[in-house]
Image: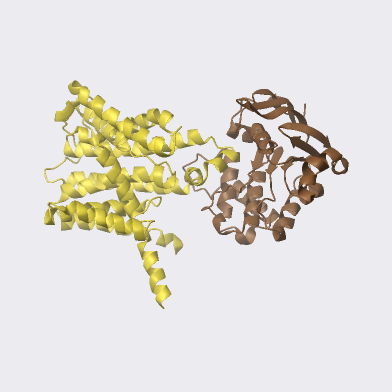
Amino acid sequence: MKMLRSFIPDTLLIALAVGAFFAFPYDLAFLTRIVIMMIFVLSIDLILGLGGIVTLGQAAMYGTGAYAAGLFAVHVSNDPLLGLLAGMAAGAVIALMSGLLLMRAGGLTLIMLSIAVAQVLAEIANRARDWTGGADGMRGIRMGPILGQWRFDFIGQTGYIYCVVVLFVVLFALKGLKASPLGLMARGIHESPARMRAIGAPVYQRRLILYTIGGAIAGIAGALAAQITQLVSLEVFSFTLSAEAVIMLILGGAGRLYGAILGVLIFMVVHHLAASVDPINWLFLIGLMVLLVVFFLPKGLLSLPPALQRLIGGAR
Amino acid sequence: MKGLQVTGLNKAFGGLVVARDITLSLQPGDRTALIGPNGAGKTTFSNLITGILKPSSGEITLDGRDIRRLGEAQRVKAGIAKTFQITTLFRQLTVRENIRLALLEREGRALRFWHRADRDPGVEAEIEAQLAAFRLVPLADKPVADLAYGQQRLVEMAMTLALKPRVLILDEPAAGVPSSDSPLITDAIEALPKDLAVLIIEHDMKLVFKVARSIIVLVQGAILTQGTPAEIAADTRVRDLYLGAHHA
């Protein structure tokens, strides 16, 4: 029974993904953006929610993954899955390299340094015009069919299904990781680095490992974005991307994986609807929503059902 | 040379000397207490042994092996474990998970990602044994944050012992524990493995005289005197310096 219950959120999620595909056949581009964002925010949930590593520069790995996948498609192979691996590897490498410095820091220093890394990478991408197209963006990405079978179509059906499948692979991998010794170790680092050292764990190395895995996942998200839009712009390194992703995670509930999924869904849908209803004041609505959630549900929207249950139970 | 051997240990922060030519030896089975007035350098000494601080000069060896270059985590792996002055645990994790994590670290399995954390039969059996030894079975699935302070102390000792250390440093094990719970701590210390070398840093003289077989008195970073509890109790200098302050 307990075993079955643990599959309820996944079943719901699959139903939602399939339902959205048929209900909004002309909004698949937007839905695909949501799915990619979910993968990106999951990468932050791993390092921030689970490992307690607070940064505002996850876009560094997303952007590197995007450019790597773009360059790979243009110069090496247009196979999407190989490109995805290239983006993943690039995200991991940049996280490992920057993490050698970043993971020695904590608190405000770490936040500032992580922002700086993304800015430096954005500037490198801007200067390396011959490779990246600089401020004009990288063009000429033409993806081949997935597994030699499924071509990317104009309305984005293949792209959507492709991204949803990758999301589920990432989600299940992270669920497994969270329940594994590595996941317990990450929670330990979050709870008390001093105690981790006292049981013999080299905390710096452990944080570096987590950051690298998070980087690999962010790289996957970036690579998907590059492959789906067939364009990479300097925006992939933007501070706004990193910051909004963290807001989405807090909104949904950090450290629980489904919080990342829920946060992205609510944030992006509200954003989309509010911006189309009131193109001028939509930001106000988003701000209000975040304010209310952080104030009343500090553990995120995922804690709403139990909170309501307590409220109703208390009234009885 | 067996055990923990400290020779001519010095530590200074600029002009402030916090450890002065400390020489001592801790052998398997020892129950040594380190006492001294506030600011005598007791915690500094513990930090030098566990690698949180690096000594300015002097030697530290464990079973003849120079451990000065080892970091904090490496010294734990080498066999030196400690409990903190203020209980330091994974507060949101359950008692069982706290001990599990310590065991997974000891076994070098904490980086495994391909199986569930609670599916290691050897580790799980050892958790149960450890829970039983410290009478924590009824509390096993509660988050540590929900436990009384004395019980948290026991969890910390259970975790630390799960590391199978050869040298155990207890930094004020009775601090913050209500006196009604202090027998819990005394019992746990008396039940420690016979071949373990134990250094107890403590203010509570009742506890010290109950469990220690040898006492070192530290004053201004240097060892004033060293002896059996009876000798220390009879020493007038100690009485003036330390016990006097308490019983005045």
- Where's the C terminus of chain A, which quadrant? bottom left
Q: Quadrant of residue B28?
A: top right
**Residue A27 position within the rendered picture, expressed as x and y whole percent measured from the top left:** 14, 51
Question: Residue drawn at (39%, 27%), measured in percent from left and top?
Answer: A97
Rendered shade, chain A? yellow
**Residue A178 position within the rendered picture, expressed as x and y whole percent measured from the top left:** 44, 47
Note whether residue B99 is visible.
yes
Q: Quadrant of residue B179?
A: bottom right
A42 left or right, relative to B107: left
A218 left or right, relative to B198: left
B35 left or right, relative to A95: right
Q: Quadrant of residue A127?
A: top left
**Residue A192 position within the rendered picture, expressed as x and y whole percent measured from the top left:** 52, 44
Question: Residue drawn at (50%, 39%), measured in percent from left and top?
Answer: B111
Above or below, B57 against A230 in this view is: above
Note whether residue A77 is visible.
no
Question: Residue drawn at (21%, 36%), measured in percent from left and top?
Answer: A235
Chain shaded brown: B
A305 left or right, relative to A31: right
Above or below, B77 against B244 in this view is: above
**Residue B33 position within the rendered picture, expressed as x and y whole percent measured from the top left:** 76, 41
